[in-house]
Amino acid sequence: MNKFDRYLRKRARENPIELPQSVRERVDRTLAELPEPVVPVRHIRPGRRIAIAAACVVFVTLFLLPNVSAAYAEALERIPVLGDLVRVVTIRNYFYQDSNHEMNIQVPELNTDTDQPAAQQINSEVDELTNTLVNRFYQELELSGTNGYGSIYVDYACITNTERWFTLKLSVCETAASSNSYFKYYHIDKTTGELITLGDLFQSERFSEVLGEEIRRQMQQQMERDKEAVYYINRSDVDSNFTSVEGTHNFYWNRDGELVVPFDKYEVAPGYMGCPEFVIDRSVIKDILKPEFSNLS
Amino acid sequence: MREKEAFCEKVQQHERAMYALAYAMVRNEQDAGDVVSESVLRAFRNLSTLRNDRSFKPWILRIVHNTAVELIRKNARLVELDDEEEIEADSGGSDLATRLALRDAVERLKQPYRTVVILYYYEGLPASKIAQITGDSVGAVRQQLSRARKQMRERLKEDFLNE
């Protein structure tokens, strides 16, 4: 049998099972559609360690620093809502699972020390969105019964929570016949306590055209470098090519303080391109960015 | 982010093995693609259950195995060869043995022999790892391999003797 065993191994090496291109592409699409790993949000739970840490923060920021640093004390006065800690907690978790369907929806809520209309507005919008998704899931479950497949996952991440800025990212991943991923970013400028949209960052309406031009340039550059990259610009075979961004378009600041403009899946490219993001160099927007947002790193 | 990138890289390393196993079980390209795709999603969601990176391959192949089993049950479709195909394979004579390559002989194996042959000969996994994937005992896997070899030896005897 050993000889036959060696023969089988040799034959298997000579005649490997090939992965069909269609399956390879499908795996690539699935990988591109995987939800981003969630940056763990520090959920506030009662406990001695947290109480001690909070007491230390309060002591250092409100008592120690203002008394040892005149500059800090002056800066503190200029920042009206400093100390207004924004906490993100999961207030509800909708979960359902059977052999064909799965739903896992984490609903975040922003808690602030004082009344913050921006935080309340975000809570309200998140609540409305997640309720819509839950209702739709159950409606589809009722319609398809055991014949259909479907899943939905909603998660959130606190992208930024500094003294100056707060950003919450809500991620939605729906899977039925195909899968779709989309995101919603919410921003609060902590110096004013206001909810900020992309359009609010700029002094003029030109931002839409400037960002659009820069993003199209990056798309073109990527397509020239990578023959498999496809974006919907200057194409006659798509309903609408990408030209510019709206004032309510998603954005966030990366760790280097650069503006990042993300797109949902299918928004500006075929599904296998995933959810593209474009980092906008500071030099591109320096003339139109409002001075207060020029350095948020 | 790094965790996702590492996961994608590993999946791409093993996607051929995942497909081979899925295809061995569901026996058509479309369903095998469904199984692989679904397995990738499940694996990513359960990444925290992978305790050792070096066990990635058997870990994800077990997910593929379980997903394929679910699909077969859902479709209520036994992917055994029908009698007509079996008779054709057995009655093919010496021409068949020379015409058929190993792949064809494997295709004609019934389950679980097809799965263990794919994992053992094509993927080079030892019986202990195969046992982890299929949920059988190591002894059962060795017995399945032994029986599979006997069946294939019969079908490939001419090609083997001419080797």
Image (cartoon, rainbow, N blue to C red):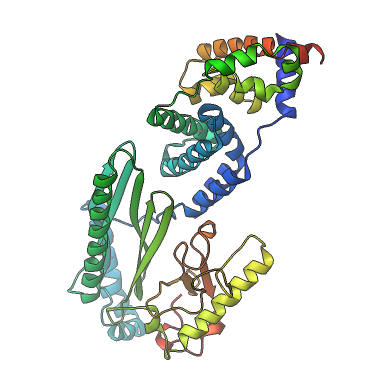
- Residue at the location (50% across, 58% down)? A271
Which residue does the image show at 56% across and 84% down from the upper left?
A283
Q: Establish if A37 lies above or below B50.
A: below
Q: Is residue A47 left or right of residue B64?
A: left
**Can residue A52 be spotted in the picture?**
no
Given the current orientation, which residue lies at the most extreme left position?
A115
Instruction: Note whether residue A2 is visible.
Output: yes
- Residue A128: % across, % down: 23, 64
| Left or right of residue A255, residue B120 in this image | right
Tell me what residue is drawn at x 50 percent, y 71 percent: A256
- Decide which of A190, A168 is in the foreground and name it: A168
Position of residue A21 measured from the top left corner of the image (x, y, whole percent): 63, 45
Q: Position of residue A23 (x, y in %)?
A: 57, 43
Q: Position of residue B78 (x, y in %)?
A: 45, 23
**Closest to the observer: A191 or B134?**
B134
Quarter of the N terminus of chain A within the rendering: top right
Q: Nearer the viewer, residue A195 or A295?
A: A195
Question: Does A248 sit above or below residue B32?
Answer: below
